[in-house]
C-alpha cells in the first residue's frame, strides 16, 4: 500500500505549491507514469488485474483532456530543461519542427495573432540548439545549473524578463514570459483570502477593501522574506510514511521543523511515522480506561 500511495501523496503536495507552473505539473505526471509503469513491469502481473492499472488509465485520461501544447511548450521553454526533454535515441532530430508547430499554434492562440512574427521558426531553432541570442554565453547556463544544484527557487519568467530587458525582444521571449507566469492552482488566491480574513476581523471591520488587500500582500511578502532568511519560528510537524531521524524528533515523537513561507513551509511534506501515531492513540485510550476504574469501583462499594 505504501509503495502505491506514496507517489500520489508526493504528487499532491508538489502540485499544491503557490508557484506550481505547467512544466512542474508535466514533470509530476511523467514521474507518476514512469513509477507505476515500473511497478507494473516489476510485479509481472496481468495488467487488468494489477491495482496500479487503474491509476495509469486515470493518468492517461487526464493527459488526454489537458492542454498538451501549453504543458509541453512550458517545459520546453524552461531554460533548465529546453531541448533535453527529447531523447535523442528514440526521437528523431525532426522533433524540433514538431515543437516549432506546437509553439506557433500556442502563440497564435494566446496572443490572438493570425500571422506569426518574422523569423519565428529561426528563433525556435536557435533556442533548441543554443545558438545565437540563446547561446550559453548569453544565458549563463553554468550559473543556472549552480542555482539548480543548490536547490534555489527560480522564478523563471522573471529571468526571461531580465533577458528581454537587457538583450532583444522576440516572440519566443514574449511567449515564455507569458506561459511561465501561469499557475495551475488557486493556492495563492486562497492564501491571500485567508490572510485577508486575519486582517479584516469583526473588530477591525472599517478597513477598506484596497487597504485590506495591500496589507495582506505586504504581510505575505514579509513572511516570504523572513522564511528565505531563516528568521521564522519553529513548529512541530508530522512525518508520515517515513521513520523520523533521532536528531530532529522531540520527546513526543513529532519532528521539529522550520515554519516555511507560502511557497516553502506550507508546501513541504509534513508527516511522522504512522506507528508512532498509532501507539500514541493506544496510550491515550489506555489512560482513559485507567482513569475510569476508581470511579467504577467506588460505585460498586456504594
Image: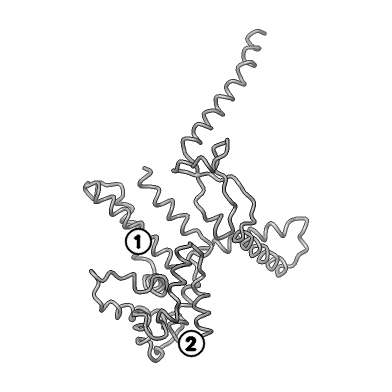
Badge 2 local density, few (<14 within 10 Å), some, or many (20+)? few
Q: Position of residue 184 (x, y in %)?
A: 48, 65
Q: Which mark is residue 208?
A: none
Q: Is residue 139 above or below residue 291?
A: below
Tell which of 82 and 215 is nearer to you. Answer: 82
Question: Image point 39% across, 63% down: which residue?
Answer: 27
Badge 1 local density, few (<14 within 10 Å), some, or many (20+)? few
Q: Position of residue 73 (x, y in %)?
A: 39, 74
- First of labels 1, 2 by sequence position: 1
Tell which of 210 and 71 is nearer to you. Answer: 71
Q: Is residue 73 above or below residue 231?
A: below
Q: Which residue is mark 1?
A: 30
Query: Are the residues at dot 1 and dot 2 in contact (C-beta closer than 8 Å)?
Result: no
Residue 104 in view (yes/no): no
Task: Identify the element where label 1 is drawn.
Answer: helix
Q: Position of residue 145 (x, y in %)?
A: 43, 69
Q: Position of residue 93 (x, y in %)?
A: 25, 77
Residue 75 in view (yes/no): yes
Tell which of 69 and 41 is nearer to you. Answer: 41
- Quadrant including the C terminus: top right
Answer with left or right where residue 124 lies relative to residue 88.
right
Task: Identify the element where label 2 is drawn.
Answer: loop
- Quadrant including the N terminus: top left
Q: Is residue 175 above or below residue 233?
A: below
Q: Which mark is residue 169?
A: 2
Is label 1 or label 2 in front? Answer: 2
Residue positioned most to the bottom: 118
Amino acid at each position: 500500500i505504501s509503495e502505491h500511495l506514496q507517489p500520489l501523496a508526493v504528487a499532491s503536495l508538489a502540485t499544491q505549491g503557490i508557484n506550481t507552473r505547467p512544466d512542474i505539473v508535466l514533470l509530476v505526471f511523467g514521474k507518476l507514469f514512469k513509477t507505476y509503469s515500473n511497478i507494473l513491469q516489476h510485479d509481472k502481473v496481468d495488467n487488468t488485474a494489477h491495482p496500479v492499472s487503474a491509476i495509469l488509465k486515470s493518468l492517461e485520461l487526464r493527459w488526454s483532456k489537458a492542454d498538451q501544447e501549453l504543458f509541453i511548450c512550458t517545459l520546453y521553454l524552461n531554460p533548465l530543461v529546453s531541448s533535453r526533454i527529447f531523447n535523442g535515441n528514440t526521437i528523431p532530430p525532426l522533433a524540433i519542427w514538431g515543437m516549432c508547430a506546437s509553439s506557433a499554434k500556442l502563440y497564435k492562440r494566446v496572443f490572438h495573432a493570425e500571422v506569426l512574427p518574422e523569423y519565428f521558426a529561426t528563433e525556435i531553432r536557435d533556442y533548441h540548439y543554443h545558438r545565437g541570442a540563446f547561446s550559453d554565453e548569453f544565458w549563463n547556463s553554468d550559473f543556472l545549473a549552480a542555482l539548480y544544484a543548490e536547490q534555489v527557487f527560480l522564478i523563471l519568467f522573471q529571468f526571461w524578463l531580465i533577458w528581454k530587458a537587457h538583450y532583444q525582444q522576440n516572440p519566443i521571449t514574449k511567449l515564455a514570459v507569458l506561459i511561465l507566469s501561469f499557475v495551475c492552482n488557486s493556492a495563492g488566491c486562497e492564501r491571500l483570502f485567508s490572510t485577508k480574513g486575519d486582517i479584516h476581523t469583526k473588530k477591525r471591520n472599517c478597513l477598506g477593501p484596497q487597504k485590506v488587500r495591500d496589507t495582506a500582500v505586504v504581510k505575505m511578502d514579509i513572511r516570504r522574506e523572513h522564511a528565505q532568511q531563516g528568521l521564522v519560528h519553529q513548529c512541530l510537524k508530522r512525518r508520515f510514511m517515513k521513520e523520523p531521524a533521532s536528531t530532529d524528533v522531540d520527546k513526543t515523537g513529532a519532528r521539529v521543523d522550520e515554519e516555511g513561507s507560502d511557497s516553502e513551509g506550507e508546501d513541504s511534506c509534513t508527516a511522522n511515522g504512522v506507528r508512532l501515531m498509532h501507539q500514541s492513540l493506544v496510550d491515550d485510550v489506555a489512560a482513559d480506561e485507567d482513569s475510569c476504574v476508581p470511579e467504577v469501583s467506588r460505585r460498586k462499594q456504594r
